[in-house]
Every structure is written in C-alpha cells, then in structure tokens.
Image: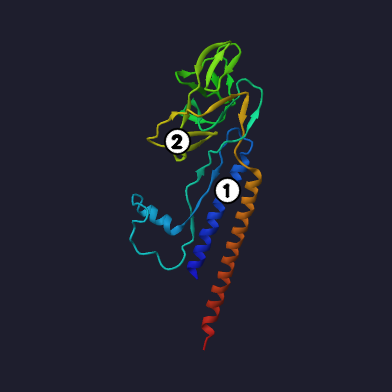
Amino acid sequence: MIRGLYTSTAGMVAHMARQVTISNNLANISTTGYKQDRTSLEAFYYKLLGLAYPEAPVGSMTMSPIGTLNTSMGVDQDEIDFSQGQLMETGNALDLALSGPGFFTIATADGVCYTRDGSFVRDASGQLVTSDGARVLGVDGPLVLGEGKVLVEGDGTVLVDGQTVGQLRIADFPQAGQLRKLGYNRFAPVAGTQETPATSAVVNQGFLERSNVDAAQSMVEMMEVLRSYEATQRMIQLQDQTLGASVNQVGTLA
C-alpha cells in the first residue's frame, strides 16, 4: 500500500513536469524561430538501471529486478523538436529565414551561439546584428554591410548594391541531441561537438520563421496530461482511504 502511494506520486510529478513543458511551448508560440521541447516519460526501473550502468549496452544487464511491482515512471531529459516552422513574409530586407536544417551563427558575450531567429538589423557601424546587438557571423567573420541595398541569395551570399560583402555562416549539427538551449532563443553545442556547413539550408530574404508550436495540438496534450494527473490523484486518495481503513479496523478483528 505504501509503495502504491510512492508509485502514484511519481506519476503525478512526471505529469506536472510535462505540463510545465507544454505551457512553456505555448508561451513561446509567437517567438520567431522558437523550437518546442518535448518531455518523454520512461519507466523508473529502466531509468534507474541506465543511471547505474550508463556504459552498458542495451540488453546486457543481468541483475535482479527491483521487487515485483511496477515502479512507475520518471521524467527523461527534454528533447528539442527541430522541425521546420512556417515562413512568414515580412518584406524587410534584413529579415531572414532558413528552410531546411541549419542555424545562423552569432557572436555573443558568452561565445559563438546558434539561432533560427533571423530578425536582424544593421547597427550604427554598418554591421549585421541581432535585435539585441549580437554580431551575425559570416564564413570570414562578422558581416559588415555598410550603406546600400542588401540582397541575400539562397546560399547565404550577401550583396550590397550588387557587390558581394560576404556569406552567412550557416551551421548544421546532424544529430539533434548535440545542441542545448541557452535561453534567448539560442543554442550551443554540447562539449566536443563540431559544427558542419549546412549544405541543404536555403536562406529566404524578407521572411521570418514562425515557432513550430502547434497551438491546437498543445492544448489537446495539455488536457490529456490534466486528465492523467487527476486520475493519478484519485488513485492516491483511494489508497489513502484504504490504508486508513486498514489501520483503524485491524485492532477490531477478533
């Protein structure tokens, strides 16, 4: 009975974590280039074994199981959904959107970062920067536009008044798990990961990429999680009532 309380509580905690993730996704539905998170749930038994034996290949563990009852679920690490968001036309020459896998490369105070947010501007010195002043990098360093009409070709080549001034440094990371979120709609690679040129990405001038959050689907998932949470909550109440009855009645047995 006590174990059942712990099992139900673990389920409630997992559903709460998933609800927080969905809420955060919905809060960023209007954030340019935002990539939603997805919370995956894993049986606690396998999660515990994975933590105890991180280097062991799947199916190679020969230890005894932990008891004979279901040990409920745990929250696995959030995964970033890098699927393409819809493109929105703005008509602004410095608004850029990527079609296909890849990221704009920017230089920040914390080092080189990556983003799908292409709402760029030209600063007082003529450099191409993000809305908060981070420099946009080209293959040969920061892009300096100067004055004049800007044209950006599909491969990232930047021309000002017909003269080539550089090419955008569009980076790719073949495996999604090689990137982590930094906040401010930026990403950084995990230790030891190297970027590669994004050969299949296409730059679209005068467009911005919308968030890839589907509001309708997220609301359905939120209701599903709420129902699961309530069901688990009722299980705890039922077990509490049963435990209370057992404790109060055991002394009355003849």
- Quarter of the image for residue 45 reads bottom left
Can you say whether 59 is above or below 137 in the image? below
Q: Amino acid at mark 1?
A: Val
Number of numbered tags placed on the structure image: 2
Query: What is the residue that sits farthest to the bottom in this orientation?
Result: 254
Residue 196 placement (x, y as % from top left): 43, 29
Residue 170 placement (x, y as % from top left): 49, 26
Q: Residue at x 56, y 76 (%)?
A: 245
First of labels 1, 2 by sequence position: 1
Q: Residue at x 65, y 30 (%)?
A: 88
Residue 43 placement (x, y as % from top left): 47, 58
Residue 115 placement (x, y as % from top left): 52, 31
Q: Amino acid at mark 2?
A: Pro
Q: Nearer the viewer, residue 33 or 102?
A: 102
**Any part of residue 201 in sight:** yes
**Any part of residue 126 in sight:** no
Residue to which mark 2 is pinned: 174
Label 2 CA crowd tier, 10 Å (few <14, some 14–19, many 20+): few
Q: Helix, strand, or loop for circle 1?
A: helix
Can you say whether 16 is above or below 193 in the image? below
Can you say whether 172 is above or below 126 in the image? below
Residue to which mark 1 is pinned: 20
Q: Nearer the viewer, residue 123 or 77?
A: 77
Mark 1–mark 2 distance (CA, rounded to whole Å) = 28 Å
Q: From the viewer's perspective, tell me whether residue 78 is left or right of residue 93.
A: left
Q: Helix, strand, or loop for circle 2?
A: loop
Can you say whether 127 is above or below 105 in the image? above
Which dot, 1 or 2, sits closer to the camera? 2
For residue 252, which numbered disc appears in the image? none
Q: Residue at x 55, y 78 (%)?
A: 248
